[in-house]
Amino acid sequence: NDEKTVFYFEKTLFIVDVSDKSNPILRSNSFDFGSHPPAIAFSPDDKTCFVIIGTSFFQRRFLLTIDITDHTAPALLNRFDLPLDTNFQLSVSSDDKLLFVSTSKALLTLDISNKTSPKVFEVQLINVTSFVLANNDQDILIANKNGLEIVSRKSKYSLYLPVHEFKL
C-alpha cells in the first residue's frame, strides 16, 4: 500500500524497496518455500502475510503466518496444518480477525486475532470452487460447478442459485 515496497513470491519471498524506481533495493529473501506458493493474502494493514505451501506429492499443506512489519527481517509467526484438498484461495476479513480458506469440500474460517495461534472458528461444508467476501464481510458468495450460493455470516441463512437457472 505504501507504493515503496514490492513483495514478490517465487520459491522465495523477496521484499524489494522501490522508493527509488531507478534503483530497487533487495531488503530480504529469507523464506524459501520449496516451490511457488499457490495462495497468498495480506492483512489489511500490510503487516502480516498468509501463505499456503506444500503439495499433494508430500501429502501435506500448511498455512504460514509471516510478520512482514520489518522488511529486512520477516518473521515466521505460525505454521498451521491445512487439509490436503485446500483449493488455494485465501481472504482476510477487513477487521483482520478472520481468514477464510477454501477446500474442495468446505470453507474454513480461522480466527487470526492472535497471529501466533490461529484457530478454526467455523467450517461450512460446501463444495467450493471460488469465493468472495461481500457487504463488509457479512456475506460470502460461493461458486462451484453446480451454481452460486450466497451465505449470510450474520444470520446463517443462504440462498442457492443452481447453474441451470442462470440466463445470459
Image (cartoon, rainbow, N blue to C red):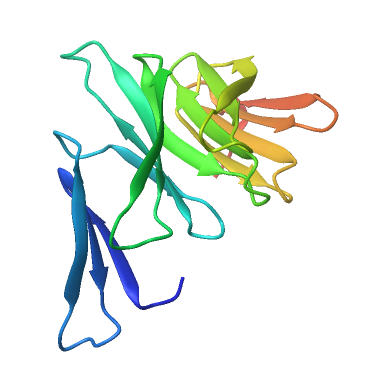
91 sits to left or right of 157: left
Q: Residue at x 17, y 47 (%)?
A: 12
Quarter location, residue 150: top right
Q: Front-most of 7 and 138?
A: 7
- Asked if 153 appears above or below 105 in the picture, the reply is below
Q: Residue at x 58, y 28 (%)?
A: 110
Q: Front-most of 117 and 140?
A: 117
* Residue 76 picture location, percent across and down: 36, 40
Which residue sits furthest right? 155
* Residue 89 picture location, percent across and down: 42, 35
Q: Residue at x 18, y 75 (%)?
A: 25
- Asked if 5 appears above or below 154 in the picture, the reply is below
* Residue 16 picture location, percent across and down: 23, 68
Q: Front-most of 144 and 110?
A: 110
Q: Front-most of 41 and 115?
A: 115
Query: How many discs mark residues in the rendered view?
Result: 0
- Asked if 56 appears above or below 1 in the picture, the reply is above
On-image quarter of the C terminus: top right
Q: Residue at x 67, y 47 (%)?
A: 134
* Residue 159 picture location, percent across and down: 74, 27
